Image (cartoon, grey):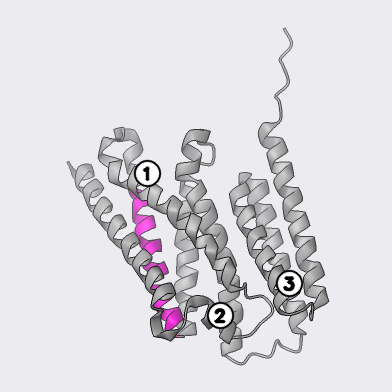
Amino acid sequence: MRLNNHVRLVQVASVTAFTFMLTIFCLSTTVPLNGRNPAQISDHYANLFAPPGLAFLIWGPIFLLLIIYTVRLQMRLNRLPDETRPRLVRQGWLFTLTSLLNGGWLLAWHLEQMRLTMGLMIMLLVFLLMLYLDVPPDLPLRRRWLRRLPFSLYLGWVSVTALANTTIFLVSMNWQGGGIDQQIWTLLLIAAMTLLGWIFLARFRDIGFALVLILALASILYRHVVLLDLAWPAVVYGICAAIGLLAGGMLLALFHAFKLKPVPET
């Protein structure tokens, strides 16, 4: 009975929190909140790392997968076997927290409270990573796209956003780079993204996570080539190298995933 009560409570909480996040996101892009959409606020704090507005289109497939996750799992918890419920209830609470934090971060972002955005972003990243790690990596393919892929894409994009948020926070504080050229700092951020992608590929064979990083890097490359007219060539070369390294890692992960097992001797 106690488990059933937790199931009903997490169903309501997760759907309510996700609806809150989705509503704030829609308002931020259509109204928009405080007169500017998220990309316009990002552009206001000029730096070489921030992705252009088109990069925010990645939220489309992320939200679609999260909606499917919410409906197919959280709304059907009471129909699942008893042995699988406790873990999914725990994941439901983590999902609720991440939704509330994401919606709160968007509100703080539009109010340009950059210190608050950093605190909320750190908490969002921590709880989202906890949720990601709680989902078994060796699920059957038919369940992996439903239970793991949404959070692979979600965590990948939030990781990129966290780096961009940190950069914009420092710009808002009038930090001058500590005497290091901004191209060098941008290349360090790109290197951090590449290393992070390789860690997730090596540890989890997570192609979805790496793919989001590649798409983010491609959007930054587009900004430098088309919008900034190749004004910072070192950054352009660095992005191309990072995309190549991540693409190579994805191919290796695919090779290991589909590698034929040796036939045992008889």
Q: In x, y percent, where is residue 22?
A: 37, 64
Q: Are marks 1 and 3 in contact (CB under 8 Å)?
A: no
What residue is drawn where x is 71% and y is 60%? 194
Residue 197 vertical position relative to residue 38 in the rendered view, above or below: above
Question: In the picture provided, is 132 more to the left or to the right than 194?
Answer: left
Residue 163 vertical position relative to residue 96 in the rendered view, above or below: below
Reading the chain from its start, which is encountered first: label 2 or label 3? Answer: 2
The residue at which mark 2 appears reads as: 42
Q: Amino acid at mark 2?
A: Ser
Q: Which residues are magenta?
A: 89-111
Quadrant showing the C terminus: top right
Within 10 Å of the Cα at label 1, are there few (<14), some (14-19), or many (20+) other Cα atoms?
A: few
The residue at which mark 3 appears reads as: 188
- Alpha-carbon span between mark 2 and mark 3: 20 Å
Within 10 Å of the Cα at label 2, are there few (<14), some (14-19), or many (20+) other Cα atoms?
A: many
Q: Which labelled disc corresponds to residue 87?
A: 1
- Alpha-carbon span between mark 1 and mark 3: 37 Å
Q: Nearer the viewer, mark 2 or mark 3?
A: 2
**Which residue appears farthest toward the top when viewing the image?**
266
Give the secondary structure at mark 3. helix
Q: Amino acid at mark 3?
A: Leu
Reading the chain from its start, which is encountered first: label 2 or label 1? Answer: 2
What residue is drawn where x is 41% and y is 74%? 30
Answer whether residue 99 is magenta in the image.
yes
